[in-house]
Amino acid sequence: MEELSDVRTARWRYSKIGFVLQESALINAMTLGENIRLSLVYAARSDKEVGVRFQSIVERLGIEVLLKRKPLECSGGERARAAFARAVLMKPQLILADEPTASLDAESRERLTDLLFELSAESGSTIVAATHDMELARRCDSIITIER
């Protein structure tokens, strides 16, 4: 890694690691669809390469009708699902998730959790999640509890 240029390091990171942040970190000037596809730009991949996967993910998350909306026109849960779609689009080897279900209603939380583990199994991704959601934690292979 030390020998890679900044550009190559960024491409490696965006093709190997998916980030699901507690706050969606979406760009407000772009639509949800553009935000999700942003990972393609960073990973230097074309829409043709992942077009079918993109469609499958947004349908499974129930956000296909929201793709032309901007983040500020969406609920917190809708933004969270779009951020999740962006994180898993590239089939990353590692998914780092910070409270991925915190802003979701029960139905969306279950849908996202199911999809997270399905996509992980399909692509062989490792999930590292920080969460207070015990339903999500129970589905993990290992749990590390941090207490004061």
Image (cartoon, rainbow, N blue to C red):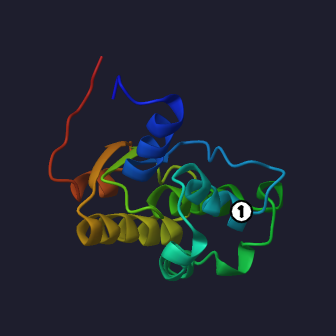
Residue to which mark 1 is pinned: 34
Residue at the (57%, 59%) spot, across then down: 40
**The image quarter in which residue 59 lies:** bottom right
- Counting from the top left corner in percent of width and height, residue 92 is at 37, 55
Percent of width and height locating residue 53: 47, 77
Helix or strand or loop: what does disc 1 sit on? helix
Coordinates of residue 42 in the picture (x, y in percent): 57, 49
Q: Report the residue at 43% width, 42% height from top.
A: 13
Does residue 110 appear anywhere in the picture? yes
On screen, residue 61 versus residue 28, left or right, reads left
User: For the point 83% across and 61% down, which residue is it?
Assistant: 73
Label 1 CA crowd tier, 10 Å (few <14, some 14–19, many 20+): some
Residue 54 shows up from this direction: no
Quadrant holding the N terminus: top left
What residue occupies the far left of the structure in this picture? 141
- Give percent across and percent down for residue 107: 50, 72
Residue in the foreground of this view, choosing between 74 and 58: 58
Type of amino acid at the residue the image marks with label 1 = Glu
Quarter of the picture containing the C terminus is top left
Taking the spot 23% from the left edge, 32% from the top edge, the residue there is 145
Q: Is residue 77 left or right of residue 49?
A: right
Q: Nearest the camera: 45 or 79?
A: 45
Q: Nearer the viewer, residue 5 or 131?
A: 5
- Where 51 sits versus 22, above or below? below
Q: Within the image, what quadrant is residue 98 found in?
A: top left
Total marks placed: 1
